[in-house]
Image (spheres, rainbow, N blue to C red):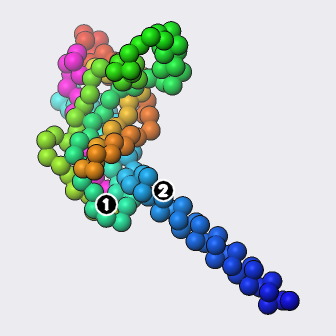
Amino acid sequence: MQLDEFLKILGTLTALVTAIFALKNLYKWLFPIHIQPGVHLSFVSNDEDEIYATITNRSNEPLYITSCSARGTYSLLRILKTHILNPLTKPRLYRNIRFAGASYDMLGNESQKIEPSQPIQLKHELVNHPLSAMHAPFFIVEVKLSSGRVLISKKSPTPGRWKTLGSARNA
């Protein structure tokens, strides 16, 4: 009787450990990279502000990044409010409701290889020009892998001074 109970407990523990490892591998498969967006504000007159992204490969195999860009975005409440107020918006315009106009490329035309557990930092300098202004209250970083998957970071707040880049107030 005691051996029977011991085998049941041992079987339950084995099933639990197997389930934990299976969930961990599923998570790595669903989210193979971790994207940490950030900003670097320069208070020196000859230096420019930067948007950067630290990208870390979580998977066990090397990955190739084909594009990486930062985009201004809005809060979920504002996006939903816009959809409710404009219910007949064409589906091809949904990205215009979610994102602000400008996109800031961080990678260029070449692809970047990331080894397992390797972090890389990609950045884009914002010049003091009105076309570099980011009017959205948040920004996200979109990363496209060579497999075609697009992964998006969490929202980060946009510094207030980026809304007035190139204006007389910011000169």
Residue 5 image point, x, y percent:
81, 83
- Residue under label 1: 118
* Mark linked to residue 31: none
83 with respect to 12 (left or right) = left
State the residue at coordinates (44%, 23%). Answer: 74
Looking at the picture, how far across and down is residue 20, in whole percent?
A: 58, 66
Residue 24 in view, yes or no: yes
Q: State the residue in front, 165 or 171.
A: 165
Crowd around label 2: few <14 · some 14–19 · many ≥20 (10 Å): few
Residues drawn in magenta:
119-132
Name the N-terminal-most of marks 2 and 1: 2
Figure quadrant of residue 8: bottom right
State the quadrant of the C terminus: top left
Mark 2 element type: helix
Establish if 27 lies above or below 21. above
- Which residue sits at x=31%, y=64%? 61
The residue type indicated by label 1 comes to: Gln
The numbered dot on residue 27 is 2
